[in-house]
Amino acid sequence: MTASTSTPTSSTSALLPDDPAFAAAVAPFVTTLTPRPDLVVAARSPSDVVEAVRWAGAAGRPVTVQATGHQLLSDLAGSMLVSTRHLDTVRVDPEARTAVVGGGAQWHQVIAAAAPHGLAPICGSSSKVGVVGFSLGGGHGPLSRAFGTGADQVRRVRLVTADGVERDVDTEREPELFAALCGGKTGFGVVTEIEIALHPVARLYGGGIFFPGAASPELLHAWREWVTTLPTDTSSSVALLRLPPDPSLPPPLQGRFVVHLRFAHLGSAEEGAALLAPMRAVAEPIADMVDEMPFAAIDAIHADPTDPMPIWDESATLSALPAEAVDALLAVAGPGVGTPLVMAELRQLGGAIARGPERAFDAVAGRDAAFTLYALAPMFPPIAGIAPAAARGVVDALRPWAIGGLPNFQGPASGGRLGALWDEETLARLTAVREQYDPSAMFRTIGLR
């Protein structure tokens, strides 16, 4: 293959913008931006990735990577996009309690493969998210307070670096690169396979409780005190939701402003119910969906949207959540506030998230945070023009307690701020690793170079 070749050749599926299959190949889950790379390579094997990267190197083309498109930070203009969504194999080793997962696989595939063995991964609030991006970006979910971040579960990464070499890296083989990948997420190569730890979790006591939005002051103030009493095998988040009049929602929730309390407890149902009792007593629920559940039903806890949509989101990590912070949140997203926001959310961190594994260095951002703050507004007309300011206003209101952010919660608004997620020492090491393995900056990263 030479630099004069117009597209990668061989069995690789290389699509140009005028190809009828191009739009489907680049379609993201978050549709705020429309990807418009110069071409897309729909890799169906690791050798396809190797060939594509070597061609890009010879042709002097920048490379971007996409699996599910849940986190599109730019329109990818001028790049060659390597799509890994077809690399979606999953192999579970029940004795080792590990799973080997292809670069494009989603969490629901891992959950389904692990469940027959009584095992579960550390996934996020939606099983439709890609495994690789979630894990390498740190990754927080309902089991993270008990077992750590998604990055802490990674045992091995196979990737194709800018020189077109496919490498297996772990704590013994190229440990500096491995540590950078586990938290640093992007800019090191195209991940074709990842090996992660699984945990002996077959069930939990969990779900969500919907309360009237009018009770949000009492509920949020009670929640901020209550979560400090929870053991590490228990996690919770709370969201102020402005639900659309969607007929697919239960009738009591259609078109309503509600408080959604999420809860997950690994102990018995009796223990979980006792822990949850103080919050159940704060207000009369509209719907209480917390109960014993198989781990495979974990999506029911957050009930995240499953259809692609355009959104504008903003986020931050918080050092604490005093009463003043709750009041500030209510002032911009609580009862009586006219806003295009559909969600303003707080998630509890701590527990095993705050501890890191033994690695060359720890590239996971936000271990010292107590909570995450997340605001989301849809980018549909006619509110698209005011949605960014509304989401930004939520984070600005809690700025006195903000100490950073998480890579997986950064959207198009993050611009050049991604580099600010790490302290100077960690960012310097991440930059050094990127420059070692990708000296010409072939792999595009936003705000990191």
Image (cartoon, rainbow, N blue to C red):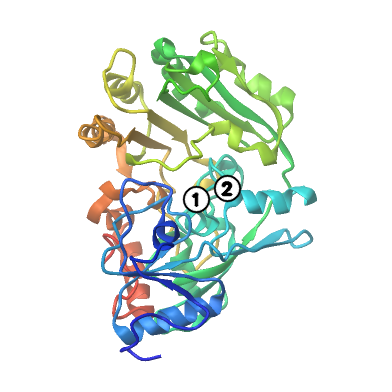
Q: Tell me the quadrant of the picture where the N terminus can be found.
A: bottom left
The reply, left or right, for residue 113 in relation to residue 404 is: right
Query: In the image, which disc is placed on residue 405?
Result: none
Occupied quadrant, residue 5: bottom left
Residue 439 spot, x, y in % from top left: 31, 80
Seen from the viewer's position, the closer of residues 438 and 67 is: 67
Is there CB contact under 8 Å for labels 2 and 1? yes
Residue 161 spot, x, y in % from top left: 44, 78
Q: Residues within 10 Å of mark 1 (few under 14, many from 20)?
A: many
The reply, left or right, for residue 148 in relation to residue 19 is: right
In the depicted structure, whether residue 430 falls above or below residue 136: below
Seen from the viewer's position, the closer of residues 157 and 424 is: 157
Q: Residue at the location (59% across, 51% down)? A: 107
In the depicted structure, whether residue 244 falls above or below residue 444: above
Q: Residue at the location (54% across, 64% down)? A: 103
In the depicted structure, whether residue 15 falls above or below residue 285: below
Q: Which residue, given by chain and number where applicable, does mark 2 sit on?
A: 123
Residue 174 visible here: no
Occupied quadrant, residue 233: top right
Q: Which residue, given by chain and number where applicable, does mark 1 sit on?
A: 139
Q: Residue at the location (33% across, 56% down)? A: 422
The reply, left or right, for residue 211 in relation to residue 198 is: left
Q: Residues within 10 Å of mark 2 (few under 14, many from 20)?
A: many
